[in-house]
């Protein structure tokens, strides 16, 4: 086997161990209880406290480890199911995030981020428009006056220009009043305008996500 130093795995070896994990994970779907059977056998190779396992563990990013947990969730609002994971991933999640409970909490957050990524690609400002909101008003028999229409138009233009959605506290008061008059929450009102309505934590993530994707476009 190739070695780059004492107990140091080469990239080829590291890839081999990761491939082994991927194959074991696939076998779990066909062999109930396989993970429990392998706990002891895999400790020598994959425990994060062992020389080889430590290197395999550090090769996984936070996102990769969380993704394994997100995939156990059933639906957007489902709960992570760490018991469905290969024991090695549970070891790694617990070490990386302090506990499986905290890892599950982080996985829920990652799931919300992924939902936002699917719903709001980097070019979302191009689709900001007052028309869907005006249609909602018309469907409820509400006719906005010229000042209200101008307020909507100016706000949409400003958001298109900056490419940054507001948080709840940044929403202009006149827009908040207008949304309530139409019977919309602030989230629904913004989304009708084509503007993301995100929590602060998801918005921070999405700003980085948009910046990366715009720069790679």
Image (spheres, helix red, strand yellow):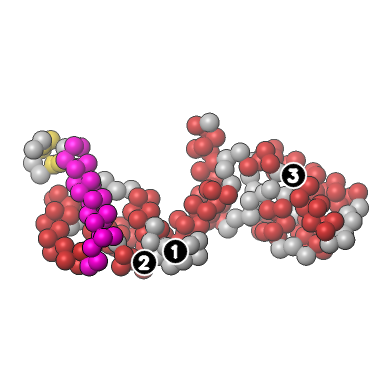
Q: Earlier in the sequence, mark 1 or mark 3?
A: 1
Q: Quadrant of the N terminus?
A: top left
Residue 106: name its quadrant: bottom left
What residue lies at 79% left-to-right and 56% top-to-bottom? 136
What residue lies at 80% left-to-right and 44% top-to-bottom? 153
Sort mark 3 into few (<14), some (14-19) or many (20+) by Cα contacts within 10 Å.
Answer: some
Q: Considering depth in this image, is 26 or 64 the residue closer to the camera?
A: 26
Measured as percent of width and height from the top left, residue 76 is found at 50, 61
User: Is residue 183 toward the left or the right of residue 206 in the image?
Assistant: right
State whether residue 95 appears in this view: no
Q: Circle 2 sits on which residue?
A: 81
User: Is residue 215 toward the left or the right of residue 32 in the image?
Assistant: right
Q: Which mark is residue 106?
A: none
Q: Which mark is residue 74?
A: 1
Measured as percent of width and height from the top left, residue 77 is found at 50, 65
What residue lies at 91% left-to-right and 49% top-to-bottom? 146
Measured as percent of width and height from the top left, residue 198 is found at 60, 55
CB within 8 Å, label 2 to label 1: yes
Q: Give the distance between the C-alpha atoms of the residues marked 3 and 2, in whole angstroms.
A: 40 Å
Question: Magenta segment, which residues?
Answer: 11-33
Q: Circle 3 sits on which residue?
A: 129
Q: Considering depth in this image, is 5 or 77 the residue closer to the camera?
A: 77
SS of the residue under disc 1: loop
Q: Give the distance between the C-alpha atoms of the residues marked 1 and 3, in whole angstroms.
A: 34 Å
Q: Residue furthest front?
A: 30
Residue 121: name its quadrant: top right
Q: Earlier in the sequence, mark 3 or mark 2?
A: 2
SS of the residue under disc 3: loop
SS of the residue under disc 2: loop
Q: Considering depth in this image, is 185 or 80 the residue closer to the camera?
A: 80
Q: Is residue 205 magenta?
A: no
């Amino acid at each position: 086997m190739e070695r780059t130093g004492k107990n140091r795995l080469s990239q080829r070896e590291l890839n081999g161990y990761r491939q082994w994990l991927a194959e074991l994970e696939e076998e779990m779907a066909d062999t109930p209880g396989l993970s429990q059977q392998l706990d002891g056998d895999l400790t020598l190779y994959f425990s994060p406290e062992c020389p080889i396992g430590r290197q395999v563990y550090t090769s996984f990013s936070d996102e990769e480890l969380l993704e394994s947990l997100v995939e156990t969730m059933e639906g957007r609002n489902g709960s992570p199911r760490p018991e469905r994971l290969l024991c090695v991933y549970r070891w790694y999640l617990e070490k990386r995030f302090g506990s499986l409970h905290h890892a599950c909490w982080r996985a829920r957050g990652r799931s919300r981020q992924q939902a936002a990524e699917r719903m709001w690609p980097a070019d979302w400002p191009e689709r900001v428009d007052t028309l869907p909101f005006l249609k909602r008003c018309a469907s409820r028999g509400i006719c906005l006056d010229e000042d209200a229409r101008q307020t909507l138009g100016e706000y949409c233009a400003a958001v298109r220009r900056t490419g940054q959605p507001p948080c709840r506290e940044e929403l202009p008061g006149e827009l908040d009043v207008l949304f309530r008059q139409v019977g919309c929450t602030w989230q629904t009102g913004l989304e009708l305008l084509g503007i993301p309505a995100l929590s602060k934590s998801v918005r921070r993530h999405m700003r980085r996500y948009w910046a990366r994707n715009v720069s790679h476009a």
